[in-house]
Amino acid sequence: MRDMLGLMKQAQVMQEKMQAMQAEMDRLEVEGCAGGGMVRVTLTAKGQLKSIGIDDQLLKADEKEILEDLIVTAHDDARKKAERLMEEKMKDVTAGLALPPGMKLPF
């Protein structure tokens, strides 16, 4: 019974940490770049698009397709950074918790 109470306490502490981390993920931002920094995309750590920055040199009608590809690449770069940040934060939240190998949170 003692173990069950300890486990429930751990679960409650983890839930509080998860809620705090989720709130922090809404505030933290990452920036992805493409084209040598000519296209920049800013996302929250949860992946919400906040802004796009485009260098004036790319604003030419005949380079529309290149610009579109660079925006997609910059977004992908930012998304990967957000995923890494989320993984790092999850390690902090689940530290000391005996989770089975390969189990990822949030579910």
Image (cartoon, rainbow, N blue to C red):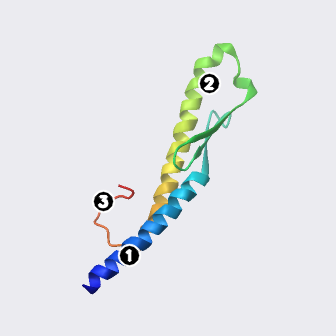
Q: Could you say which is closer to the camera, residue 94 or residue 22?
A: 22
* Pointer 1 local density, CA inside 10 Å: few below 14, some 14–19, many at least 20: some
The answer to whether 87 is drawn above or below residue 36 in the figure is below
Q: Residue at x 28, y 86 (%)?
A: 2
Residue 67: quadrant of the picture: top right
What is the number of the mark on residue 10? 1
Give x and y (percent) for residue 48. Answer: 55, 42
Q: Label 2, on which residue?
A: 67
User: Does any portion of residue 58 appear in the rendered image?
Assistant: yes
Separation of marks 3 and 2 at Cα, in angstroms: 39 Å
Q: Quadrant of the C terminus?
A: bottom left
Disc 3 residue type (three-letter): Gly
Give x and y (percent) for residue 77. Answer: 54, 41
Q: For this view, does 25 lie left or right of residue 52?
A: left
Q: Residue at x 31, y 60 (%)?
A: 103
Give x and y (percent) for residue 89. Answer: 50, 62
Q: Label 3, on which residue?
A: 102
Q: Residue at x 43, y 66 (%)?
A: 15
Mark 2 secondary-structure assignment: helix
Q: Could you say which is closer to the camera, residue 95 or residue 1?
A: 1
